[in-house]
Image (cartoon, grey):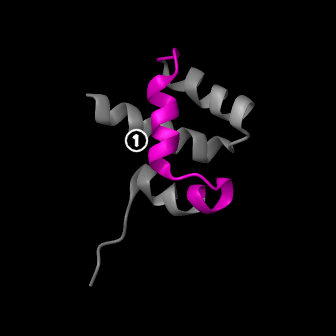
Amino acid sequence: MSAQVKGPASYFPSIEKKYGRPVAEWKGLIRSSPLTRHMELVAWLKTEHGLGHGHANALVAHTLAEKG
């Protein structure tokens, strides 16, 4: 019996399928961005890369949580 993935990571399979890039690549883009604030990064992913709000928010939240 496998535990169901919860939180931002639950979006990862659909993000990879919809946008054709692995999550690690998206995280690399977020880390290399000069932007540091959560909503700035979300807006950047939406504007520059065409992600939907929920997907962008999940990627940013998960990536910023790893930095701590």
Residue 50 vs residue 25: left or right? Answer: right
- Residue 8 vertical position relative to residue 56 in the rendered view, above or below: below
Q: Residue at the location (44% across, 50% down)?
A: 8
- Residue 37 vertical position relative to residue 28 in the rendered view, above or below: above
Q: Main SS type for the magenta part?
A: helix
Packing grade of label 1 (10 A; few <14, some 14-19, many >=20) is some
Q: Residue at the location (40% across, 36% down)?
A: 63
Residue 55 place in picture, x, y as percent: 59, 47
Judging from the image, what secondary structure is the residue with disc 1 in?
helix
Residue 47 place in picture, x, y as percent: 74, 30
Which sits in the foreground, 10 or 67?
Answer: 67
- Residue 45 vertical position relative to residue 39 in the rendered view, above or below: below
Residue 44 vs residue 25: left or right? Answer: right
Is 53 one of the magenta-colored residues?
Answer: no
Q: Residue at the location (30% across, 36% down)?
A: 66
Is 33 one of the magenta-colored residues?
Answer: yes
The C terminus lies in which quarter of the figure? Answer: top left
- The image quarter containing residue 6 is bottom left
Q: Residue at the location (59% across, 31% down)?
A: 42
Which residue matches tag 1?
A: 62
Q: Which residues are magenta?
A: 15-36
The N terminus lies in which quarter of the figure? Answer: bottom left
Residue type for callout 1: His
